[in-house]
């Protein structure tokens, strides 16, 4: 899979992992965003398109070939079994795509941002794991502000994710993101540490 170092960036909802990913990108390390890429692949990856159409019917896609998001969301988020079935299609497509992307980057370090690093199997494709975390209350407030979800909705979403404590036990590195400590310095130190190790 090439000789570049593959760093996974993960963390729970509201932890600020996207902010850390953005800083890492600014510092010259390419970052693969699993969420946004998965949405693109659901419209572009032939195997995935076929699988989704088989699962939910041709209405999954609009006449122009783009994903019919409202239709799909209504099918997926009302049924836990459907979430599992879709993930079983999407996760392997994202992993294939990430491997190809990482191979073609030609960089010393590449990063991948994923909220479901362990659940998706992507953990098997990376060398090191960075967990971004914050205290629960900060994460709840951030998510409510950003998404418009209610407190109960955020807490319900959190319960479905691996906890920060568990993630920290599995991590190689961690950054505490409380919106007060300067992240720039933490990210710079982290990248220097990774380069020094390899």
Image: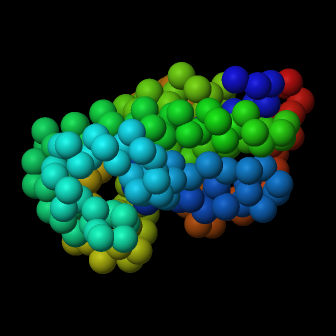
Query: Percent x, y for residue 149?
Result: 26, 71
- 57 relative position to 65: left or right: left
Query: Percent x, y for residue 5?
Result: 76, 30
Q: Is residue 161 visible?
A: no
Query: How is the rendered protein coloured?
Result: rainbow
- 59 relative position to 1: left or right: left
At horizontal 26% and vertical 46% (from top left) the residue drawn is 52
Q: Quadrant of the N terminus?
A: top right
- Residue in the foreground of this view, choosing between 112 and 14: 112
- Residue in the foreground of this view, choosing between 149 and 100: 100
Rendering quarter of residue 82? top left
Query: Percent x, y for residue 94?
Result: 48, 40
At horizontal 89% and vertical 30% (from top left) the residue drawn is 196
Q: Is residue 62 visible?
A: yes
Q: Quadrant of the C terminus?
A: top right
At horizontal 76% and vertical 25% (from top left) the residue drawn is 2
- Residue in the foreground of this view, choosing between 67 and 98: 67
Please identify the residue farthest to the right as the structure is shown: 196
Instruction: Decide: is 54 above or below 143.
Output: above
Query: Percent x, y for residue 130?
Result: 61, 38
At horizontal 44% and vertical 27% (from top left) the residue drawn is 121
Please identify the residue farthest to the left as the structure is shown: 79
Rendering quarter of residue 18? bottom right
- 7 relative position to 137: left or right: right
- 73 relative position to 20: left or right: left
């Amino acid at each position: 899979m090439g000789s570049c170092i593959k760093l996974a960036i993960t963390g729970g909802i509201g932890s600020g992992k996207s902010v850390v990913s953005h800083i890492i990108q600014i510092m010259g390390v390419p970052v693969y965003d699993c969420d946004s890429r998965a949405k693109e692949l659901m419209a572009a990856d032939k195997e995935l398109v076929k699988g989704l159409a088989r699962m939910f019917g041709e209405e999954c896609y609009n006449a122009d070939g783009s994903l019919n998001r409202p239709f799909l969301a209504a099918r997926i988020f009302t049924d836990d079994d459907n979430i599992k079935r879709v993930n079983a299609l999407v996760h392997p497509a994202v992993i294939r795509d990430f491997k190809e992307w990482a191979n073609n980057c030609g960089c010393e370090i590449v990063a991948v941002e994923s909220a479901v690093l362990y659940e998706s199997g992507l953990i098997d494709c990376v060398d090191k794991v960075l967990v971004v975390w914050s205290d629960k209350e900060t994460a709840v407030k951030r998510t409510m502000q950003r998404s418009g979800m209610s407190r109960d909705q955020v807490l319900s979403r959190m319960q479905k994710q691996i906890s920060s404590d568990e993630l920290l036990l599995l991590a190689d590195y961690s950054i505490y993101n409380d919106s007060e400590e300067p992240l720039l310095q933490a990210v710079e130190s982290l990248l220097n540490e990774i380069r020094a190790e390899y």
